[in-house]
Image (cartoon, rainbow, N blue to C red):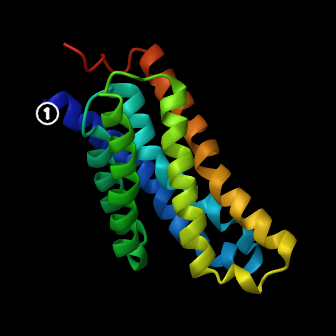
């Protein structure tokens, strides 16, 4: 990877890592006050890869940016370090896998949303076990799962909007040679 690509991934990683750190600090409060919304908080962690792939459109930038964002988030809320790194590898890996399945040639929004739905399902399953949602009322179980699946989709839309804005503003040149 070129220095330009590495620095772009680092810049995206810092900004999205700060958001991840904020998410880490508000997580206990969300779990106490509105546990149904936890999936939405967790969904913010899709941003590093989405923005990096939308801006650079290159292999491995999602995973690299996720790891960098996890390191920044860990510096701001170290109590979640292992979770940040695990989430970075999982989410970045899923985003890279979906991009690899299209041979890194499909950069339309649908491809990003496929990875968002896959990540949403992973979040829903993980959150269902971690939060013991079987103890919730049926309506709350459904809401919990729906929000967990939709949250990465919403954050993906935000990430695409940011990435597209950066590309249009000419902040970065395309990654293609």
15 above or below 103? below
| Residue closest to the far front | 101
Q: Residue at x 33, y 26 (%)?
A: 57
Where in the figure is residue 38, as x and y percent of width and height? 65, 67
Where in the figure is residue 106, as x and y percent of width and height? 40, 23
Q: Mark 1 falls on what kind of element?
A: loop
12 lies left or right of 31:
left
Q: Residue at x 34, y 43 (%)?
A: 97
Quarter of the image with the N terminus is top left
Q: Residues within 10 Å of mark 1 (few under 14, many from 20)?
A: few
| Residue closest to the far left | 2
Quarter of the image with the C terminus is top left
| Residue closest to the far bottom | 135
Task: State the image quarter where residue 166 is shown.
Answer: top left
Where in the figure is residue 82, as x and y percent of width and height? 34, 74
Q: Residue at x 63, y 63 (%)?
A: 39
Q: Which of 173 and 92 lies nearest the eye of the viewer?
A: 92
Where in the figure is residue 18, as x and y percent of width and height? 45, 55
Task: State the image quarter where residue 50 is shown.
Answer: top left
Q: Which residue is tagged 1?
A: 1
């Amino acid at each position: 990877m070129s220095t330009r690509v590495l620095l772009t991934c680092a810049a995206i990683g810092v900004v999205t890592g700060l958001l991840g750190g904020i998410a880490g600090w508000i997580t206990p409060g969300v779990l106490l006050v509105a546990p149904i919304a936890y999936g939405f908080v967790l969904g913010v962690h899709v941003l590093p890869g989405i923005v990096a792939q939308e801006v650079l459109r290159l292999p491995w930038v999602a995973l690299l940016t996720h790891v960098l964002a996890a390191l920044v988030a860990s510096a701001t809320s170290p109590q979640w370090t292992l979770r940040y790194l695990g989430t970075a590898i999982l989410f970045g890996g899923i985003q890279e896998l979906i991009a690899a399945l299209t041979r890194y040639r499909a950069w339309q929004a649908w491809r990003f949303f496929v990875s968002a739905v896959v990540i949403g399902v992973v979040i829903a399953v993980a959150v269902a076990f971690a939060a013991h949602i079987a103890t919730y009322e049926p309506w709350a179980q459904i809401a919990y799962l729906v929000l967990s699946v939709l949250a990465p989709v919403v954050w993906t839309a935000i990430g695409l909007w940011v990435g597209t804005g950066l590309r249009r503003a000419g902040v970065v040149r395309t990654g293609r040679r």
